Image: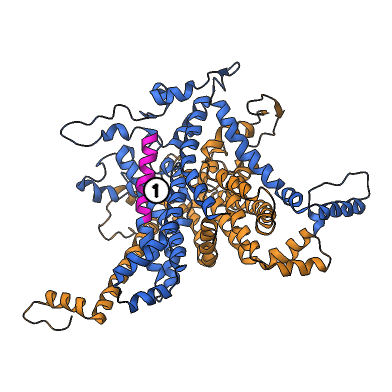
């Protein structure tokens, strides 16, 4: 079996079997640390080439302009980042997209920030999408987990039904909601528009409706993921705690509040962090169901500028990575505290 | 809620719920069924909607006379499922998706097996830091990798960042499986590593020792003892990787420069192709989506235990 190992390729001159034997012997004689790093080499190569190198190179490219034009790329330092945050770069984004929200005005009669402005900002849209969808996914996922935690006839099939949305391709998820709200094919606009929930005409080109659509579609697909994580947490709770509670005369609500919820909280935290990181990458769903110029997310802006403004595109990409890195730090801290 | 006397049935019933455990449990039970039904309807309705669209002829879809609130197909036009393959070679796109998913799964499983063995069974300095590093890298968005990868895959010279040393000129990978399999492998490798670390770590030390006494090498013990004994874990990692690749959108839509099956455009390209025809065929889009969903639905039904355990093991490191 070890003949299939590609590591430490034998030299061509020596007889094959002899080289193989010596390679195997060399490997066997490696210390545990050496052996560990030898086996990890493919991981280092793959992640180094496909993740680490691009990440560093993205940062480097973000410091240049005219990366793909005629002539040499021109060093501009942090100008792209400055442009992003001062609004100078906004004209390069599709539609009327801005990177930050412009003047967030609070007008007197309406005590909210200027919604229209907020929905044109790539950063704001990404954050709104993340917070709202993760919030509802947690809530619904919790509900689904509580249902799946019960013992009942047909539980297996209910679980299948709940998992299936999680497993379907993003393109089909987007297509379903695109068709639901399409002006000539869909039915949902007719139902929801009278209540002012979505725009009456051109629903798919309306920023607020488009964002709502993306959020609902995301909740539909990924609540199941939350449900499974929370379910695992629920099932790891010691059942005898509930027996004790029953003997002590605790009501179901008290059992939930005093046993289930505190014990599930760490799991819930991990699950929320995972989903937050994932939700901030949102791109495909928006691309299919409405479009990047209607609902500008950060990843959307990277994709829609990378063929023309590669330096700027890299800057947006690096900012996206930075925003996500904040959430990643949370996960790492959590894992570190638990101890690897 | 049996007796309806002077107090009015609602008051009696409320009283009963508060006082009578039996009645209270019945209320919980029915509430439970209502909630379950609600979740079933909300998760399955979108699929029903696809089916309705697929079976309704395109001309009737455009009229938009859905008799709300009970949506049902206008007619029974099953020919749409045949037309899907006639208008574009949809089977080729699905085939591409399958090939990409299979290649990625094989690569990921091989590399993750070695890594899972290392992390699950060996003690060495730097273990914790390396695992954290892999974890951290796996969270970065694909968008952060896009620009340099696209540059490299279109055949530009790979330059060492910040040093300016030109390393090598890669072959033009766009429109080939390589341009997708490489990013997919990197993206989905960490999850498999964590799943396999958990499973390989659980095999008792004695079994490995026994194999070693018999004269196998360390790698021999991994492939002959540990991996076969961890078959459920390997199956879990395979299923999750396969589904993840099949569902991926970002690189799938970018690395095939146009939606041609000859350029290895996967499912994404196929489903979007019905949009760019001279007329938008809603029924075909829906029918193609139904066909595209089938493989994963079958996979979920067959392998749901594996999916559940894999997702939770990968995320929670039980």
Q: Which residue has dot 1 on it? A: B282
Residue A125 lies in the magenta-colored region? yes
Q: Quadrant of residue A225?
A: bottom left
Answer yes or no: is residue A324 visible: yes
Give the image location of residue A281, x and y in percent. Answer: 46, 42
Name the quadrant of the N terminus of chain A.
bottom right
Q: Residue furthest top?
A: A71
Q: Is residue A276 left or right of residue B95?
A: left
Answer above or below: position of A110 versus B128: above
Q: Residue at x 7, y 78 (%)?
A: B7
Q: Give neighbour class at mark 1: few <14, some 14-19, many 20+ (Cα, 10 Å).
A: many
Q: Left or right: B50 with respect to B298? A: left
Whether A277 is drawn above or below B205: the answer is above
x, y (%) of residue B19? Answer: 20, 79
Closest to the observer, A82 or B282: A82
Name above or below for residue A38 compared with residue B204: above
Q: Is residue A195 left or right of residue B300?
A: left
Name the residue rendered at 29%, 68% in the picture: A253
Is residue B106 found left or right of A88 in the rendered image?
Answer: right
Labels in figure, total: 1
Q: Secondary structure at mark 1?
A: helix
Q: Quadrant of the C terminus of chain A?
A: bottom right
Confirm whether residue B53 shows in the render.
Answer: no
Q: Colour of chain A?
A: blue
Q: Which residues are magenta?
A: A123-138
Where is residue B28? Give x, y as percent: 28, 73
Q: Which chain is orange?
A: B
């Amino acid at each position: 079996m070890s003949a299939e190992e590609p590591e430490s390729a034998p030299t061509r001159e020596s007889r094959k079997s002899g080289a193989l034997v010596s390679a195997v012997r060399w490997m066997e004689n490696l210390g545990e640390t050496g052996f560990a790093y030898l086996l990890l080499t493919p991981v280092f190569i793959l992640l180094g080439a496909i993740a680490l190198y691009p990440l560093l190179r993205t940062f480097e490219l973000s410091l240049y302009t005219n990366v793909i034009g005629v002539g040499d790329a021109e060093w501009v330092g942090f100008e792209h980042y400055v442009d992003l945050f001062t609004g100078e770069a906004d004209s390069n984004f599709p539609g009327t997209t801005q990177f930050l929200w412009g003047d967030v005005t609070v007008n007197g009669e309406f005590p909210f920030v200027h919604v229209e402005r907020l929905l044109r900002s790539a950063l704001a849209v990404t954050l709104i999408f993340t917070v709202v969808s993760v919030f509802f996914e947690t809530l619904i996922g919790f509900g689904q987990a509580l249902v799946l935690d019960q013992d009942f006839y047909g539980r297996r099939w209910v679980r299948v039904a709940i998992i299936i949305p999680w497993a379907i391709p993003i393109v089909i998820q987007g297509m379903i909601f695109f068709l639901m709200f399409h002006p000539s094919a869909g039915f949902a606009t007719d139902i929801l528009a009278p209540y002012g929930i979505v725009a009456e005409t051109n629903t798919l080109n309306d920023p607020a409706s488009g964002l709502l659509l993306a959020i609902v579609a995301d909740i539909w697909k990924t609540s199941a993921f939350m449900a499974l994580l929370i379910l695992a947490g629920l099932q790891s709770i010691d059942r005898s705690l509930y027996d004790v509670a029953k003997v002590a005369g605790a009501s179901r609500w008290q059992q939930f509040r005093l046993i289930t919820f505190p014990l599930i909280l760490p799991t819930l935290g991990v699950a929320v962090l995972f989903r937050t990181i994932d939700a901030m990458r949102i791109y495909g769903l928006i691309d299919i169901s409405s479009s990047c110029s209607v609902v500008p997310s950060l990843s959307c802006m990277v994709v829609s500028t990378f063929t023309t403004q590669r330096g700027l595109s890299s800057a947006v990409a690096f900012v996206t990575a930075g925003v996500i890195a904040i959430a990643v730090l949370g996960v790492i801290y959590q894992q570190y505290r638990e101890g690897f | 809620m049996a007796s309806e006397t002077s107090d009015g049935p609602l008051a009696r019933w409320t009283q009963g719920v508060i006082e009578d455990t039996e009645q209270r449990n019945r209320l919980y039970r029915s509430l439970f069924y209502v909630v379950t039904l609600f979740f079933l309807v909300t998760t399955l309705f979108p699929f029903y909607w696809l089916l309705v669209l697929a079976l309704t002829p395109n001309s009737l879809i455009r009229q938009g006379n859905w008799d709300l609130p009970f949506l049902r197909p206008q007619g029974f036009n099953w020919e749409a499922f045949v037309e899907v393959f006639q208008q574009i070679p949809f089977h080729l796109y699905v085939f591409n998706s399958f090939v990409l998913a299979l290649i990625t799964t094989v690569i990921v499983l091989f590399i993750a097996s070695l890594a899972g063995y290392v992390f699950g069974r060996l003690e060495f300095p730097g273990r914790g830091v390396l695992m954290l590093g892999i974890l951290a890298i796996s969270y970065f968005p694909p968008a952060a990798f896009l620009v340099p990868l696209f540059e490299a895959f279109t055949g530009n010279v790979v330059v060492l960042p910040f040093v300016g040393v030109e390393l090598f000129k890669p072959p033009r990978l766009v429109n080939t499986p390589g341009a997708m399999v490489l990013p997919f492998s990197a993206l989905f490798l960490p999850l498999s590593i964590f799943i396999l670390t958990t499973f390989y770590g659980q095999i008792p030390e004695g079994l490995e020792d026994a194999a070693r006494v018999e004269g196998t090498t360390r790698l021999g013990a991994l492939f002959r003892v540990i991996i076969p004994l961890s078959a459920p874990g390997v199956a879990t990692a395979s299923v999750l990787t396969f589904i993840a690749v099949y569902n991926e959108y970002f690189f799938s839509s970018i690395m095939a420069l146009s939606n041609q099956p000859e350029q290895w455009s996967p499912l994404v390209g196929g489903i979007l192709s019905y949009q760019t025809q001279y007329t938008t065929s809603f029924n075909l889009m829906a029918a193609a989506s139904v066909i595209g969903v089938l493989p994963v639905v079958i996979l979920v039904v067959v392998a749901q235990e594996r999916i559940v355990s894999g997702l939770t093991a990968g995320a929670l490191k039980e």
